[in-house]
Image: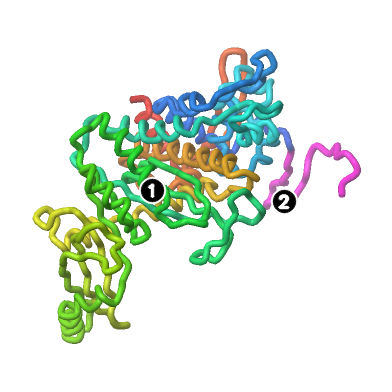
Amino acid sequence: MLTTECTQSGFEFEAHFSRSVVARFDGGTMTSDGGALLLGRTDRRLNLVARVAACFRDRRNAAYVSHSVQGLIAQRVYGLALGYEDLSDHDQLREDPLLAMLSGKAQVGEEPLAGKSTLNRLELSTEKADRYKKIHCQTEALDELLVGIFLEAHASAPERLVLDLDVTDLPLHGHQEGRFFHGYYDSYCYLPLYIFCGEHLLCARLRTADQDAAAGSKSEVERIVTQIRRLWPTVEIVLRADSGFCRDELMQWCEEHGVSYLFGFARNELLRRLIEAPMQEAKRQHQASEKPARVFTEFRYETTTGSWSRARRVIAKAEYLDKGENPRYVVTNLSAASWPAQPLYEELYCARGETENRIKEQFSLFAARVSAETLRANQVRLYFSAVAYVLLHGLRRLGLQGTELARAQAHTIRLQLLKIGAQIRITVRKIWISLASSFPRQNIFAHAWTELLR
C-alpha cells in the first residue's frame, strides 16, 4: 500500500537508440472515447435520450436537483454503449468532460457528473413514495417507445413484418428477488423475453425462470401488434420462434387476429411415424450420394392429448446425415400456396437464427448485469441496456451503411469506431476535441458524421 505522495514529474525508461524515453503526466485533459461524438449525433437524430427521460416521473424538489433525469439517463446509456458496465465506473467517468458534454452539462469541465450512488437511486426507484428514491420509471411508456422508434425507422409501411421471439438466461450469483433454478440452463437465472423485427428491438421483458418459455408472450405480442396496426392497419405480420413458443394460446390468438405464425414443433414418436416414407427416401439419397439429404413433406396434425384446439399445418424436414436421422418440424398457419414446405423451412424459418446475434449484442451491452436486489430494478437495468442497443443500432443504421462496419456488432463498433484517444481543450467559446491523428478509420468516422447530418 502506498503511503507517500509522489512528487516526481517525469519517468525515464530505457533509451530508444539515440533518444531517451521520458514519460510525464502533462498531456492535459484526455479521453479514450472520442468516437462517442457520433453517439451524441445519433441521439439527436433519434431524439432518443430525451424521450426515454420523458418515461420517468421525477418527484424531486427542483431547488435541490444537480443532475436532471435526462442527464442521468444519458450518462448511464452512453456509459453502457462505451463499455462501462458498472455503476462504480462512474466515480471516475464523472470527471470526463466529453461524457459531461454529451450528458448535457452546461459547465463542462467545472461540474462533475453523477456518482454511482445517484445513478443507483435512479435504478432503485419504485412507484411508492420514498425519501431517497423519487424517480419513477413508467415501464408502459418505455415499452411503447421501443416500438415507436421502430415504426419511425420506416418511410412507408413494409409489405411484411416478421417478429422474432426468443428467450435467454441471465445467470444470478446472489439472492435477487425472483431467483429460481432453471433445469435447462442448469443455474439460477432470470429468463427475459426478447422480441425483434430484423435488427430492431421491440421488447425486453425481464421474467423469472419458474415458468414456461412462452409465458406472457401473448400479451406482449398483442401490445406490439396493436401499436403497429394503429399506423399500418393492413401490414402482414408473421410471428417466428422455436418450439418453446408453440403453445395453443398464442397460436389461437394469432388465428383470431389475422396474424401469421411459424413455430418450431418438438419431436415425438407419432410425428416420426408420419414421416417414415420421406425419411427412408432421405436415407436412400444419403447412401447414394454420401452427402446430407433432406426430403420435405407436410400434413394436417392435431395433438392426441387435446392440447391444441384444432388441427394445424405441420411441415416436416426428413433429413439424414452421416450420424443418422435428423428430423425437424414446424407448425404454421401460412398457406401452402404462398409458402411451399421447403422454402418455408429453409428461407423463412431458418432465418430466425439471426436473432441469436441480436441477443449476443444485448450481452455486449451488459444486459446480464442484473445484480440489483429487486426484480423491478433489474428490469430498469435491462431497459438501459436496450436503449444503449437502440442507440448503437441507430448509428449502424443511419451512419454506417455502405461501410465495412455496416453489419458489425455492437462490441465491434465500440472497439473500432468509438474508442478514439482524444485531447480536450475548453476555451470560453469552444470545446476543442483533438482526435488521434493515427486513428485508422478516419474515413468511416467522416462518413458517419456526414450521414448523421441528413
Above or below: residue 213 compared with residue 96 = below
Closer to us: 261 or 50: 261
Q: How is the image coloured?
A: rainbow
Q: CA distance from mark 2 to mark 1?
A: 65 Å
Q: Tag 1: Cα neighbours inside 10 Å, few (<14), some, or many (≥20)? A: some
Residue at x-position 18% and y-position 83%:
280
173 on left or right of 228: right
Q: Is residue 130 visible?
A: yes
Q: Tag 2: Cα neighbours inside 10 Å, few (<14), some, or many (≥20)? A: few
Closer to us: 418 or 438: 418
Using the rendered view, name the quadrant where residue 349 is placed.
Answer: bottom left
Residue at x-position 40% and y-position 40%:
393
Using the rendered view, name the quadrant where residue 246 is placed.
Answer: bottom left
Above or below: residue 418 compared with residue 208 = above
Q: Which residues are magenta?
A: 1-24
Mark closer to the observer (2, 1): 1
Q: Provide the residue designation for mark 2.
A: 15
Query: First in sequence: mark 2 or mark 1?
Result: 2
Closer to us: 384 or 41: 384
